[in-house]
Image (cartoon, rainbow, N blue to C red):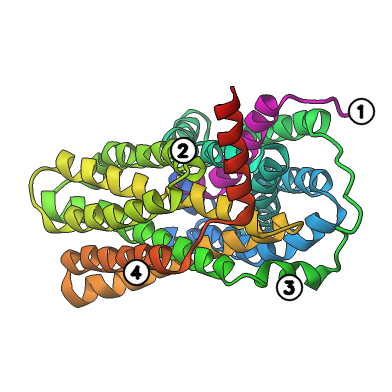
């Protein structure tokens, strides 16, 4: 097929679909665990390792694909990622034993690891710095939709046609998105002098210390999110005596905060005082997360606080990559690949350290952990991070154009 020139809006829709599917490819396993355990005559604990298998290849591949994409082109890598992800999901339909399913999940993780960073980098290629934050915010909202709408859809399909049907439907949607990207994603020729060697891309992004501070801030805010969200269901069950099944709706409502985060984060990322707002979101995310686990009112009040904490913590998912892309030069996918690694560090730290705090002092200590981590993130923003020259130049240009008009 010969690619056509797509409008930025259409391209953004397709990139949101690709990013949302990458996120859903991991989340979709949750409702399927019991059915898969029954199918392969094993335990839920063993089948749960399918999530780990997907996450492992995702975490390993994400930082490696960046330099390849920055050297050989975004289109080639993005299409490869979507098609590998599609093959992994559709291949799962044909799995005749657990080992084969693990193999296809490993492949799915590799495809998702290629798709997500390239989707963010493609946004940077398409939108100028002063509009980039909102576009990345929509990508974040797409992952939120995967959590709040995609997972319930998987559960519905499981009930309607067994565990193979969700893989078939999600895989087919991924195939359609891949074909549309093949038609509409533009062919962009690398600019002269931008074809750096593999490790040169890492050297390019590492020259500015601010880059590493932003990665650390994002990892800390992801710890707040996963530390709060990861133990929310257990808190609702133990504190308010809710049966496990009745936590589904509260968790879905709390997950709406992820969608809101994409919208708010995009606007924060493009705001002239974005660093002040970013720091404020860190302070408030920790405060609300602490209140989730330290106030006893009602399940719905707790869910409202959790929704706010999730939304404010995930603002980092829009602001941090926007900042990183401005500092990355020609190594944009390398930057977004390292951003994906910081997300995984945050997820591991939030779940691991949060669990240690829970064992040490109960849910109250989990809340205090989230508050402490958010305070550190806010202080690093205020003391160590400054706006990039690229953003300041674009902001000055936008202000001068507005004044002239």
Whichever of callouts 3 and 4 sits on the residue coming sooner in the sequence is 3
Distance of mark 2 from mark 4, alpha carbons?
Answer: 23 Å
Distance of mark 1 from mark 4, alpha carbons?
Answer: 50 Å
Please determine whether, in this image, residue 231 is positioned above or below residue 16: below
Q: Residue furthest bottom?
A: 360
Q: Quadrant of the C terminus?
A: top right
Q: Position of residue 388 (x, y in %)?
A: 58, 56
Nearest to the observer: residue 192 or residue 47: 192
Residue at disc 3, secondary structure: helix
Q: Which residue is mark 2?
A: 267
Whichever of callouts 3 and 1 sits on the residue coming sooner in the sequence is 1
Q: Where are the magenta residues, as a range? A: 1-30
Q: Which residue is mark 3?
A: 203
Determine whether, in the image, residue 366 is placed left or right of residue 183.
left
Distance of mark 2 from mark 1, alpha carbons?
Answer: 35 Å
Q: Is residue 55 visible?
A: yes
Residue 376 numbered mark, or none? 4
Q: Do labels 3 and 2 touch, CB within 8 Å?
A: no
- Nearer the viewer's eye, disc 2 or disc 1? 2
Dot 3 crowding, Cα within 10 Å, few <14, some 14–19, many 20+: few
Residue 2 numbered mark, or none? 1
The residue under the point 59% across, 49% down is 391
Determine whether, in the image, residue 218 is placed left or right of residue 301.
right
Whichever of callouts 1 and 4 sits on the residue coming sooner in the sequence is 1
Please determine whether, in this image, residue 310 is positioned above or below residue 398: below
Distance of mark 3 from mark 2, alpha carbons?
Answer: 30 Å
Residue at disc 4, secondary structure: helix
């Amino acid at each position: 097929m010969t690619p056509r020139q797509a409008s930025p809006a259409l391209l953004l829709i397709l990139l949101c679909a690709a990013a949302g599917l990458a996120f859903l490819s991991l989340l979709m396993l949750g409702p399927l665990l019991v059915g898969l355990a029954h199918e392969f005559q094993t335990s839920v604990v063993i089948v749960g390792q399918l999530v780990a298998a997907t996450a492992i290849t995702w975490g390993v591949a994400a930082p490696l694909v960046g330099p390849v994409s920055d050297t050989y082109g975004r289109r080639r890598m993005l299409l490869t990622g979507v098609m590998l992800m599609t093959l992994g999901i559709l291949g799962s339909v044909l799995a005749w034993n657990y080992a084969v399913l693990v193999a296809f999940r490993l492949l799915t993780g590799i495809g998702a690891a290629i798709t997500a960073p390239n989707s963010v980098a493609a946004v940077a290629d398409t939108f100028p710095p002063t509009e980039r934050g909102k576009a990345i915010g929509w990508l974040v909202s797409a992952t939120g939709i995967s959590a709040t709408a995609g997972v319930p859809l998987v559960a519905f399909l499981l009930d309607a046609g067994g565990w193979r049907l969700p893989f078939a439907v999600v895989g087919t949607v991924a195939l359609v998105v891949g074909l549309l990207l093949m038609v509409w994603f533009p062919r962009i020729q690398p600019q002269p002098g931008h074809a750096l060697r593999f490790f040169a891309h890492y050297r390019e992004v590492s020259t500015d210390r601010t880059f590493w501070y932003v990665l650390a801030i994002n990892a800390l805010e992801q710890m707040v999110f996963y530390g709060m969200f990861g133990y929310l269901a257990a808190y609702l069950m133990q504190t308010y005596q809710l049966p496990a099944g009745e936590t589904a709706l509260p968790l879905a409502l709390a997950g709406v905060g992820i969608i809101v985060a994409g919208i708010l984060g995009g606007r924060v990322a493009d705001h002239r005082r974005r660093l002040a707002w970013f720091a404020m979101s860190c302070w408030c995310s920790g405060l609300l997360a602490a209140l989730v686990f330290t106030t006893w009112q009602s399940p719905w009040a707790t869910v409202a606080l959790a929704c706010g904490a999730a939304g404010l913590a995930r603002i980092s998912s829009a602001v941090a990559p926007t900042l990183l892309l401005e500092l990355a030069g020609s190594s944009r996918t390398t930057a977004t690949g390292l951003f994906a690694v910081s997300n995984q560090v945050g997820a591991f730290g939030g779940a691991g350290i949060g669990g240690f705090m829970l064992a040490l002092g109960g849910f109250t200590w989990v809340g205090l952990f989230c508050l402490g981590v958010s305070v550190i993130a806010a202080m690093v923003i205020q003391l160590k991070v400054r706006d990039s020259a690229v953003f300041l130049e674009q902001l000055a240009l936008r202000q001068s154009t507005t004044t002239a008009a």
